[in-house]
Image (tube, grey):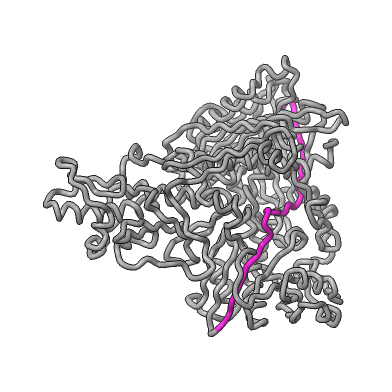
């Protein structure tokens, strides 16, 4: 794909504003050929005539190929990647390809843009979508030429006869191809990968021009005739409700139309709105002023006693006692009793908020027994079913249009805010934009769980690790959907039951913990606290043994091998919903990223060069990642991250540019969590409210250089969006120990060291 690249330096922009500063390079990719249809503000245009081989591909008589992107674009470049994969398999020229966004519809299969699954789970399915259309076009051309289909090839938006070089363009074939019966999957052959000319290349960001020029449509950008804006005063405590309220002052605010009381949430929370009072107004400012004027008294409910600091102590007590055994190899307790030396440590992580750049927003219109919604959602099908349930409609009467998302990190796969918009629009009798503020987003999230872990290892007389005992306790995600108090198999499959260890005696236990707020998945999910504890503990073992942390890590992982469930001491490995045959636990890949990242960071020269480096590695979402972080002290004795290296083996890569961007973003995201990330609760309510107290890493606090290295591979694709995050915080903590001698066992670091 050709593209035009306009290079804008920070200096040139600032000089144009009459300012001068050091240059920060910004490269904007402007595709000269492929184009994206505008994000929907009405029902999407559906091409008529021509070939519709499946729900993803349409070939029009004029030659325009329309490809549907059914996953949500939130900065990861899915609209710039998946359609190109389909087009390559089809043989389309991107100059004649239009990408449109799919509405929420079960016809597309799984649309939930979560779990780093947009490529790894549907790579072949998308190829077959393109290959099916190609097969039908080739069949028509072969029939016209009276030759075998094997003598023809589709490329450059046409079908060619190999022997005579006769050519028929896709548009010329589309009408007759539409009359054919769609072939079954086993009658369709995929191209050799060598013919997928864009696979693994750095592809242009399709929505880049609209984003940088302000034409891009995000959730809050949708405007409908007669639309009103609403904000909601929600109960401070999850599960709370309105005890009493007086809206007199609110209704006196110019522009305020009405106050709508929403049903209180009941357990389990699921994807229900939290309830409260919606202030509907002519504009956002009036709605916010009206909400501030509300006189409301809240009833706290069961969770009003929740104190996150006190709960931390409860979790520490829990991991002091036996839990459910989820993994057992040999006799860890017996081996510990006989060990020459025992090393023990506990690790804590707090609740975390998603805090995407764009807070949740949705626009809803309810009329004539139907509901139409425009939403910044990762999960349009769940949004559709939840809206239908809340309004008492058949799902066929609900349409969910997906706008661009300004970040998501898992928050926007929970459609409570979409349901809010629909309920308020119905009550208002007019289209309504439901807007969350930053304070709403921080204080009413589905929070990443707080955790406590106790690890103990036994060393023999030579310092070899011979026993490993680990207890884990955290309120599970399942608590949001049921009365679950133990972590589910999926959570235990994120760095616990799938953790490869070359240790003869291992025991891991899942301990009980009850939730007192809404718990939800956040980018990398349970891998965050599991990797923090395990990778920090291995660094501690290296110090106790007097050995290099890298060498200790490699020794504990063991030799290159495929690790079976029997080796792990478990009946099965969840494996992120994919087969172990296609995606085995492979220590060779984990060792390779460790060796590569330590080589790139000049690990062996660090002491001679006076650098403090920390290392961590982790397998998650079927991808292997290792990180090295360099830290220094500034003039005020504060810890600063100076440089970072990240190496990933993710199997087959579709869009290298976006993979690199995701890994860079993972480093910054992980540093934010490691340095500052913490949600605290008192009397059941969140203490933090905005970025002033729920801190993210700022520009000066991020590494001056983030080095990204992607190991080439033609293996099955793994995940990308999440796997870069888990090793970052432990690598940072280990670097802090290397610099200061202070061991960090609790996140965020700001609680332990000066940052």
**Residue 345 is covered by the magenta coloring:** yes
Using residue 622 as the reference point, say whether residue 57 is left or right of it: left
Please provide percent x and percent y for residue 143.
Answer: 15, 55
Please provide percent x and percent y for residue 488.
Answer: 61, 55
The residue at the point 24 percent across, 57 percent down is 172
Please provide percent x and percent y for residue 307.
Answer: 84, 58
Q: Residue furthest top?
A: 608
Please provide percent x and percent y for residue 271.
Answer: 63, 67
Using residue 397 as the reference point, say whether residue 456 is left or right of it: right
> Which range is magenta?
339-367
Using residue 192 as the reference point, say whether residue 357 is left or right of it: right
Image quadrant in which you'd find residue 453? top right
From what the image shows, is residue 712 above or below residue 262? Answer: above
**Quadrant in the picture for the C terminus:** top right
From what the image shows, is residue 552 above or below residue 197? Answer: above
Q: Residue furthest left?
A: 146
Q: Is residue 528 visible?
A: yes
549 and 313: which is toward the camera: 549
The residue at the point 65 percent across, 29 percent down is 466
Count of marks, rendered view: 0
Q: Residue furthest bottom?
A: 368
Q: Is residue 504 visible?
A: no
577 and 714: which is toward the camera: 714
Image quadrant in which you'd find residue 47? bottom left
The residue at the point 63 percent across, 49 percent down is 523
275 and 405: which is toward the camera: 405
**Quadrant in the picture for the N terminus:** top left
Image quadrant in which you'd find residue 252? bottom right
**Residue 713 is covered by the magenta coloring:** no
From what the image shows, is residue 420 above or below residue 10? Answer: below
């Amino acid at each position: 794909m050709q593209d035009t690249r306009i290079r804008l330096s920070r200096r040139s922009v600032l000089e144009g504003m009459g300012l001068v500063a050091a240059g920060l390079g910004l490269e904007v990719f402007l595709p000269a050929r492929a184009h994206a249809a505008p994000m929907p503000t009405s029902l999407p245009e559906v091409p008529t005539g021509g070939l519709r081989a499946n729900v993803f591909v349409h070939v029009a008589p004029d030659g325009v190929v329309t490809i549907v992107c059914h996953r949500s674009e939130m900065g990861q470049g899915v609209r710039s990647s998946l359609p190109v994969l389909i087009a390559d398999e089809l043989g389309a020229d991107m100059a004649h390809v239009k990408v449109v966004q799919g509405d929420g519809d079960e016809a597309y299969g799984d649309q939930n843009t979560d779990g780093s699954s947009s490529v790894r789970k549907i790579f072949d399915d998308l190829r077959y979508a393109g290959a099916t259309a190609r097969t039908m076009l080739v069949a028509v051309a072969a029939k016209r030429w009276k030759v075998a289909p094997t003598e023809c090839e589709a490329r450059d938006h046409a079908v060619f006869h190999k022997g005579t070089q006769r050519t028929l363009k896709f548009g010329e074939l589309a009408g007759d191809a539409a009359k054919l019966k769609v072939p079954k999957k086993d009658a369709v052959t995929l191209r050799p990968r060598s013919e997928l000319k864009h696979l693994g290349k750095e592809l242009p960001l399709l929505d880049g021009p609209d984003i940088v020029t302000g034409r891009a449509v995000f959730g809050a950008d949708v405007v409908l005739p007669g639309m009103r804006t609403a904000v909601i005063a929600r109960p401070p405590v999850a599960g709370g409700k309105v005890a009493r309220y007086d809206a007199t002052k609110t209704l006196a605010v110019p522009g305020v139309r009405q106050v709508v009381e929403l049903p209180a949430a009941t357990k389990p929370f699921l994807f229900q709105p939290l309830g409260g009072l919606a202030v509907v107004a002519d504009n956002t400012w009036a709605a916010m002023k009206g909400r501030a004027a509300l006189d409301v008294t809240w009833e706290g409910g069961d969770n009003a006693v929740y104190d996150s600091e006190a709960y931390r102590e409860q979790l520490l007590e829990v991991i002091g006692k036996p839990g459910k055994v989820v993994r057992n190899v040999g006799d860890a307790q017996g081996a510990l009793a006989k060990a020459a030396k025992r090393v023990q440590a506990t690790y804590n992580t707090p609740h975390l908020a998603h805090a995407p750049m764009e807070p949740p927003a949705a626009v809803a219109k309810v009329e004539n027994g139907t509901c139409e919604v425009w939403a910044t959602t990762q999960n349009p099908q769940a949004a559709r079913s939840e809206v239908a349930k809340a309004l008492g409609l058949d799902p066929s009467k609900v349409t969910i249009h997906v706008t661009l998302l300004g970040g998501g990190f898992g928050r926007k796969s929970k459609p409570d805010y979409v349901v809010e918009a629909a309920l308020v629009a119905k009550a208002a009798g007019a289209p309504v934009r439901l807007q969350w503020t930053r304070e709403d987003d921080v204080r009413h999230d589905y929070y990443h769980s707080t955790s406590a872990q106790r690890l103990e290892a036994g060393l023999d007389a030579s310092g070899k690790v011979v026993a490993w005992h680990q207890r884990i306790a955290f309120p599970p995600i399942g608590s949001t959907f049921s009365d679950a108090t133990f972590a589910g198999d999926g959570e235990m499959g994120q760095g616990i039951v799938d953790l490869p260890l070359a240790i003869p005696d291992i025991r891991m236990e899942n301990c009980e913990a009850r939730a007192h707020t809404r718990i939800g998945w956040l980018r990398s999910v349970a891998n965050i606290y599991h990797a923090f504890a395990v990778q920090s503990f291995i660094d501690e073992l290296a110090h106790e043994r007097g050995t290099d942390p890298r060498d200790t890590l490699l020794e504990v992982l063991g030799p290159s091998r495929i690790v079976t469930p029997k080796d792990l001491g478990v009946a099965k490995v969840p494996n992120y919903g994919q087969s172990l045959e296609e995606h085995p636990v492979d220590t060779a890949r984990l060792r390779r990223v460790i060796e590569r990242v330590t080589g790139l960071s000049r690990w062996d020269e660090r002491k001679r060069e006076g650098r403090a480096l920390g290392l961590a590695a982790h397998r998650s979402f079927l991808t292997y990642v290792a990180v090295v972080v360099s830290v220094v002290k500034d003039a005020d004795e504060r810890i600063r991250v100076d440089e970072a290296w990240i190496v990933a083996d993710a199997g087959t890569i579709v869009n290298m540019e976006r993979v690199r961007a995701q890994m860079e973003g993972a480093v910054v995201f992980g540093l934010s969590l490691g340095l500052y990330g913490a949600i605290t609760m008192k009397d059941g309510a969140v203490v933090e409210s905005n970025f002033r107290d729920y801190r993210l890493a700022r520009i000066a606090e991020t590494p001056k250089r983030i080095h990204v290295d992607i190991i080439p591979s033609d293996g099955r694709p793994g995940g990308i969006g999440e796997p870069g995050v888990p090793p970052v915080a432990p690598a940072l903590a280990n670097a802090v120990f290397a610099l200061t001698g202070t061991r960090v066992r609790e996140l965020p670091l700001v609680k332990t060291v000066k940052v």
